[in-house]
Image (cartoon, rainbow, N blue to C red):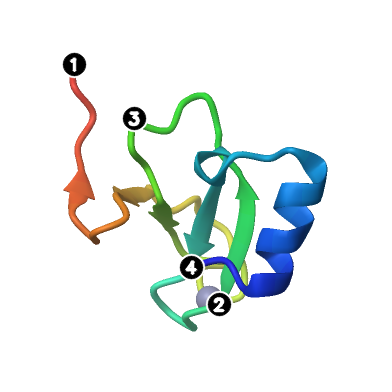
């Protein structure tokens, strides 16, 4: 969830709550809020993938979750 300060900033900037997703590293649990990517599935609230500290080198495949923590799967 965004902090109250982040919510204030969002409101001041006219940003809708659904415009941002939380990036989370499953290794070190680092979190970062970023603008939702156009490739994210509908309803994405959390995108989990390993940060460069936890996975130097290879790209990790991201896992998408909705606001209830339910994993979202891409529809072909
Ligand atoms: Zn990490």
**Discs 3, 2 touching: Cβ within 8 Å:** no
Q: Mark 1, mark 4: which one is toward the viewer?
A: 4
Q: CA distance from mark 3 to mark 2?
A: 23 Å
Q: CA distance from mark 1 to mark 4?
A: 30 Å
In the rendered structure, find residue 42 and report the number of the disc placed on it: 3
Whether residue 31 is situated above or below residue 57 in the rendered picture? below
State the residue in front, 57 or 17: 17
Which residue position holds label 4? 1
Q: Mark 3 or mark 2: which comes first in sequence?
A: 2
Q: Mark 2, mark 4: which one is toward the viewer?
A: 4
Q: Mark 4, mark 3: which one is toward the viewer?
A: 4
Q: Is mark 2 within 8 Å of ligand 1?
A: yes
Query: Tag 2's secondary structure?
Result: loop
Residue 2 lies left or right of residue 60; in this view the side is right
Q: Mark 2 or mark 4: which comes first in sequence?
A: 4
Crowd rating for badge 3 (residues with CA inside 10 Å; few <14, some 14–19, many 20+): few
- Residue found 62% across the figure and 65% down from its top: 32
Query: Tag 4's secondary structure?
Result: loop
Whether residue 73 is situated above or below residue 71 in the rendered picture? above
């Amino acid at each position: 969830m965004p902090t109250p300060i982040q919510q204030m900033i969002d409101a001041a900037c006219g940003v809708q709550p659904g415009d941002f997703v939380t990036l989370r590293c499953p290794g070190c649990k680092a979190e970062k809020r970023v603008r939702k990517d156009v490739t994210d599935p509908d309803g994405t609230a959390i995108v989990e993938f390993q940060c460069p500290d936890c996975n130097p080198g290879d790209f990790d495949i991201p896992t998408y979750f909705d606001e209830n923590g339910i994993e979202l799967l891409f529809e072909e």
